[in-house]
């Protein structure tokens, strides 16, 4: 998709963002995109024809100030964003995904999965769930698992729904993009290791989340979340300096123009810093890695409406732009 520059004022917060773009029939390249929808090819600026956004983040400690200065400099030649295709902003080495991290979403799930023998009112069961969430936030740990970079696709690309996926669902999420290696960092240190934020729609086939052949095994995230294209990403990486508070952003997902998810990151059980810190206690987070921070209430299972051929999803997060993807059913061979 080529961006319409008429919508430039709504691109993102701050003076600039990072992107991966390509000209027609040209290779992808790392770009600085300004708030007035102009593009600067960062390969030429840094004198490196092989530079990528991930490569830029590997030197982000020294490159960040230089990139910020470029956004204010009218000297280097710029090109209109409308002339370029927008790809996923980065190819990460690792993808970390957080589940069950929005209070209202988890309360809804708790109430929906009622034991038939439980005769209490919905109000009583909600009160119990709320108490559990408070205790979990105070005493428990985030729930984090890993995804595959091969599931990532662009923010305006079609999403192919595999023929085997019986219940494909949406999950709009705020994503932290790592800019400095992080291993066993505290929650107080975690935000210093983030270069910026972007958007992901972490699609999930609800029919394959739990193993049918051996329920004792539990969840099967490989099968349910990692089909090619199941993680539309972007359009931009907006630097942390332009996002005043990642704990106060609005996530909105619309399906064919109808709002399905509309929630603030204030509803997170574990904030961004705690999720990043927790993931780093086991793994070494590397520049360009993605940390998906969970999805709020309003998934397809809640509405009784799953994705199907021709559906169009618009996903936005405050200050991070909007992605639009169309669902296409896989053609059986």
Image (cartoon, helix red, strand yellow):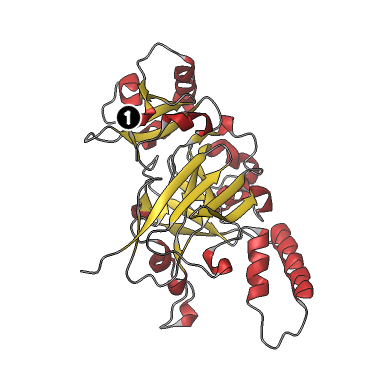
Residue 254 visible to the viewer: yes
- The picture places residue 161, in percent across and down from the top left corner, at 36, 63
Q: Is residue 148 above or below residue 216?
A: above
For the N terminus, give its image quadrant: top left
- Residue 285 in sight in this render: no
Q: Quadrant of the C terminus?
A: bottom left
* Above or below 15: residue 106: below
Residue 234 position in % (x across, y down)? 44, 43
Image point (54%, 69%), residue name: 301
Query: Element type at marker 1?
Result: helix
Residue at point 65%, 53% (across, down): 268
> Which residue is located at x 45 percent, y 37 percent?
236
* In the foreground, 332 or 137: 332
| Most foreground residue, 77 or 186 | 77
Residue that badge 1 annotates: 83
Q: Is 290 on the left or on the right of 266, as rendered? A: left
Find residue 44 and report its image quarter: top left
Going 31% across and 30% down the picture, which residue do you hit?
51
Residue 263 at x, y = what percent? 64, 52
Compared to residue 131, the image places residue 259 above or below, namely: above
Front residue of this view, candidates 228 and 311: 311
Q: Give how far across and how far down residue 149 sits, in percent.
A: 37, 52
């Amino acid at each position: 998709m080529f961006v319409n520059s008429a919508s430039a004022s709504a691109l993102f917060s701050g003076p600039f963002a990072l992107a991966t773009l390509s000209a027609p029939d040209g290779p992808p390249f790392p770009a600085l995109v300004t708030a007035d929808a102009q593009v600067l090819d960062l390969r030429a600026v840094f004198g490196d024809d092989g530079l990528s956004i991930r490569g830029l983040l590997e030197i982000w400690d020294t490159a960040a100030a230089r990139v910020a200065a470029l956004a204010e400099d009218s000297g280097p030649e710029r090109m209109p964003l409308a002339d370029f295709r927008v790809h996923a902003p980065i190819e990460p080495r690792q993808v970390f995904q957080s589940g069950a991290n929005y209070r209202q979403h988890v309360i809804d799930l708790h109430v929906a999965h009622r034991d038939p023998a439980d005769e209490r009112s919905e109000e009583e069961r909600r009160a119990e769930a709320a108490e559990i969430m408070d205790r979990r936030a105070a005493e428990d740990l985030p729930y984090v698992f890993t995804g595959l970079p091969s599931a990532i696709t662009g923010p305006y690309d079609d999403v192919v729904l595999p023929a085997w996926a019986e219940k494909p669902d949406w999950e709009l999420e705020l994503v932290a993009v790592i800019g400095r290696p992080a291993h066993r960092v505290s929650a107080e240190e975690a935000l210093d290791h983030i270069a910026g934020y972007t958007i992901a729609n972490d699609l999930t086939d609800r029919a394959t989340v739990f193993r049918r052949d051996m329920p004792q095994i539990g969840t099967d995230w490989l099968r349910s979340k990692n089909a090619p294209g199941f993680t539309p990403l972007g359009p931009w990486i907006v630097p942390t300096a332009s996002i005043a508070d990642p704990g106060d952003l609005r996530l909105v997902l619309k399906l064919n123009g109808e709002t399905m998810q509309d929630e603030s990151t204030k509803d997170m059980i574990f904030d961004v810093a705690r999720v990043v810190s927790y993931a780093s206690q086991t793994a070494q987070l590397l520049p360009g890695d993605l940390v998906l921070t969970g999805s709020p209430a309003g998934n397809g299972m809640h509405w009784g409406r799953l994705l199907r051929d021709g559906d169009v999803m618009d996903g936005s997060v405050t200050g991070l732009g909007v992605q639009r993807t169309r669902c296409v059913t896989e053609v059986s061979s």
